[in-house]
Image (cartoon, rainbow, N blue to C red):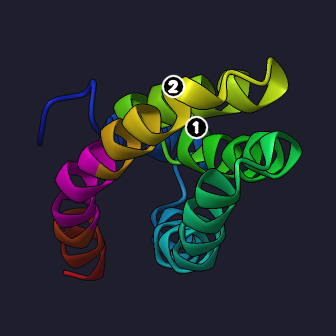
Amino acid sequence: MADTAIFDFDDALDRAGGDRELLLEILEIVPRQAIDAITQLRMKVAEKDAAGIERLAHFLKGGLLNISAHEAAEAAHRLEDIGRYNRMPEAQQALAAFEAADRVLQPLLVDAIRSLKA
């Protein structure tokens, strides 16, 4: 499939216990849940709300790790640390990096979902 640093299909399938139906369900749920969290994350960055950034980035990181989306998870981890250590001057750039990683990830997830439905 694609670059495993971005999305590792085989690892995601292993995490789902080899159950393709379960992986399909997870791949359909995680991105939907992330949409609201990303919107909230943008607001927290604009508000310079360190605790909110940390909480939302942690939530996103967990979901991304569960689907083996390593690059986006690493970008979320960076945002989580920025919130945890109140490094607000870095937040906007880190958010942009996260959003860029997410834009690359989304078509790969769509392809994986199509593959699992075939």
Q: Residue 86, relative to residue 1: is it above or below?
A: above
Nearer the observer, 103 or 96 = 96
Q: Position of residue 73 (x, y in %)?
A: 51, 34
Residue under pointer 1? 65
Q: Position of residue 104 (x, y in %)?
A: 18, 50
Residue stretch rendered in magenta on the structure: 100-109
The mark found on residue 90 in the picture is 2
The amino acid type found where label 2 is placed reads Glu
Q: Position of residue 66 (x, y in %)?
A: 61, 44
Q: Main secondary structure of the magenta part?
A: helix
The residue that appears at 71% across and 47% down in the rendered structure is: 48
The amino acid type found where label 1 is placed reads Leu
Q: Is residue 6 left or right of residue 48?
A: left
Q: Secondary structure at mark 2?
A: helix
The residue that appears at 49% across and 25% down in the rendered structure is: 74
The mark found on residue 95 in the picture is none
- Separation of marks 1 and 2 at Cα, in angstroms: 23 Å
Q: Is residue 11 visible?
A: no
